[in-house]
Amino acid sequence: GDSVTQMEGPVTLSEEAFLTINCTYTATGYPSLFWYVQYPGEGLQLLLKATKADDKGSNKGFEATYRKETTSFHLEKGSVQVSDSAVYFCALKTSYDKVIFGPGTSLSVIP
Amino acid sequence: GEEVAQTPKHLVRGEGQKAKLYCAPIKGHSYVFWYQQVLKNEFKFLISFQNENVFDETGMPKERFSAKCLPNSPCSLEIQATKLEDSAVYFCASSQSHGEAYEQYFGPGTRLTVT
């Protein structure tokens, strides 16, 4: 079945460090790919998305590129801030409309 | 509205009691989805609706769980005779249409604690 795998962490970085959170997926068909973020005590927010191969999603300094050949959608940010501390979920959505989430990666950014 | 609204924010029930959660989708969105987030961040799809019709219920537990989306009313998810393992955050999401390109917008969730 469809699934998403991502590094679970926790990941701890110093402010201004470079961030990469790896995400790979397994899916039939051509899914859309998403990164969601969940700040402490809050709900899910869509961070960025890509709907087809080679698309790059970007928002708030975060980027991810849909790589069909490696079935990956790695999240990157060049310089993290304390306010980026949150749990990040990689997800896919197929034509059947269920969103399949990865296990989440907890990120802590220390000053 | 412009956001998915969920009520209540927190709900505490004793084991065996009924729990009812509500979701108001974004105006103009015809699809509603319910997800359950349990310990260690795991999300489980429960059920989806196209307007008031069930679209996909493959994730719904056969017993105790039911859901409705009636015209001009918030959608609801009801758990009869709650169990400890029902403790979770329940998220509702809505989308304009179905298909890969349509993103789902999530509400803030309802945290259910069963004691």
Image (cartoon, rainbow, N blue to C red):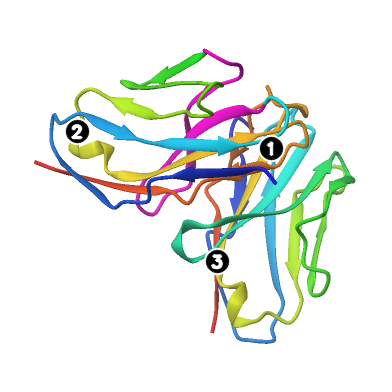
Q: Position of residue A89 (x, y in %)?
A: 46, 42
Residue type highlighted by circle 1: Ser
- Quadrant position of residue A53: top right
The image shows residue A51, relative to residue A83, as above or below, that is: above
What residue did someone put label 2 on?
A81
Q: Position of residue A75 (x, y in %)?
A: 38, 29
Chain at numbered mark 3: B
Q: Which residue lies at the image location 83% right of the left edge and 53% below the top edge?
A: B57
Residue type highlighted by circle 3: Ala
Chain at numbered mark 2: A
- SS at mark 2 in the image: loop
Q: Which residue lies at the image location 56% right of the left edge and 21% below the top edge?
A: A68
Say left or right for B43 vs A1: left
Same chain for the residues under marks 2 and 3 in the image = no
What residue did someone put label 1 on?
B94
Quick one: label 1, few (<14), some, or many (20+) residues within 10 Å?
A: many
Instruction: Report if residue B100 lies within the magenta region.
Output: no
- SS at mark 1 in the image: strand
User: Is A81 or B58 nearer to us in this picture?
Assistant: B58
How many angstroms separate mark 3 from mark 1 (CA)? 20 Å
User: Is A53 or A58 nearer to us in this picture?
Assistant: A53
Quick one: label 3, few (<14), some, or many (20+) residues within 10 Å?
A: many
Q: Position of residue A59 (x, y in %)?
A: 39, 20
